[in-house]
Image (spheres, helix red, strand yellow):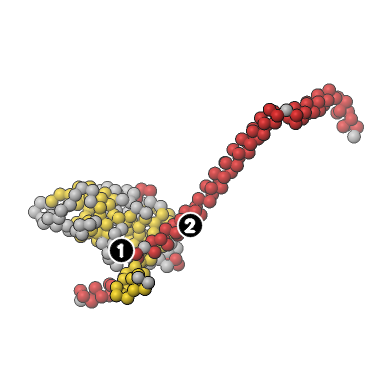
């Protein structure tokens, strides 16, 4: 107590000055409209700026969850597309609609590792057998065809992309129905080749290439556009170069396709070849 009294005596004048200043500011801001408006406006700008930054940080932290929800919703939309179903009976109708049975099922996954500048490129996705994923499931993204699952563990799967020398997928020219096989030549990760198309085919630069229906993919998944084509000397076929829609240098979210009737189809085709 003695020290406090001594402090007040030694600093009496500054303390009185500060006290009078507080009273003066109180009178000014409480009885003058202009000063009130200025202080409220400044306070609003400061709190607004803080709230905006807080909101930006919160939105960023919630972005991962939003992406997961969006991917699941996209997979659900894929599952509801007519291309995921087959007609069971065209003659039997329910409320003027054809009866359908689901054939293809879609599930979202995230790419956790990938290469695109090597010869034997691959992608690793964050879903495996525990999630119901299997070998030979097709893989696509929002831009189009990606590849096929070739090996699997409990929690991860390896995807052989289109840009792999062993990848061989059935495709066709949209609206023209020329069929061929998609095979990468190992040169450019944005360009692949379509083989086994007759040199009598009527093609144009820019024609769209899509998947042909197989035991892996439904028909109509975008692949790319014809960049150029040329006749192969001494052959009845064309060299067709396809510019891919998928950019493998920044692939992230994918969807895996399960053909629920693949086994039945393969058994029947094996009997035919035997």
Q: Can you identify the residue that label 2 sits on?
A: 69
Q: Can you identify the residue that label 1 sits on?
A: 218
The CA span between labels 1 and 2 is 25 Å
In this image, 268 relative to 13: left or right? left
Residue 166 is at least partly visible in this image: no
Q: State the residue at coordinates (28%, 62%).
A: 219
In this image, 258 relative to 17: left or right? left
- Residue 81 percent location from the top left of the image: 36, 63
Q: State the residue at coordinates (58%, 43%).
A: 54
Residue 26 is at least partly visible in this image: yes
> Secondary structure under badge 2?
helix
Q: Quadrant location of residue 209? A: bottom left
Q: In the rendered image, which quarter contains the C terminus?
A: bottom left
Q: State the residue at coordinates (38%, 51%).
A: 251
- Residue 58 percent location from the top left of the image: 56, 47
**Comes first in the chain, label 1 or label 2:** 2
């Amino acid at each position: 107590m003695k020290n406090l009294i001594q402090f007040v005596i030694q600093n009496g004048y500054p303390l009185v000055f500060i006290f009078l200043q507080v009273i003066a500011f109180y009178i000014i801001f409480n009885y003058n409209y202009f000063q009130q408006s200025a202080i409220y406006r400044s306070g609003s700008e400061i709190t607004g700026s803080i709230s905006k930054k807080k909101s930006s940080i919160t939105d960023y932290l919630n972005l991962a969850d939003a992406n997961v929800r969006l991917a699941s919703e996209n997979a659900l939309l894929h599952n509801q597309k007519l291309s995921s179903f087959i007609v069971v009976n065209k003659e039997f109708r329910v409320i003027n609609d054809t009866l359908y049975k689901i054939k293809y099922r879609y599930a979202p996954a995230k790419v956790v590792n990938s290469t695109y500048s090597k010869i034997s490129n691959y992608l690793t996705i964050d879903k495996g057998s525990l999630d119901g994923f299997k070998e030979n499931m097709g893989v696509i993204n929002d831009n189009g065809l990606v590849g096929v699952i070739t090996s699997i563990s409990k929690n991860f799967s390896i995807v052989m992309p289109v840009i792999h020398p062993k990848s061989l997928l059935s495709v066709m020219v949209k609206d023209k129905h020329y069929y061929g096989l998609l095979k990468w030549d190992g040169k450019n990760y944005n360009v692949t080749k379509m083989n086994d198309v007759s040199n009598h085919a009527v093609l144009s630069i820019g024609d769209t290439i899509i998947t042909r229906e197989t035991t892996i993919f439904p028909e109509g998944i975008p692949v790319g556009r014809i960049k150029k084509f040329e006749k192969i000397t001494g052959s009845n076929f064309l060299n067709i170069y396809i510019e891919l829609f998928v950019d493998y240098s920044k692939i992230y979210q994918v969807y895996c396709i399960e053909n629920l009737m693949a086994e039945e189809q393969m058994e029947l085709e094996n009997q035919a070849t035997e």
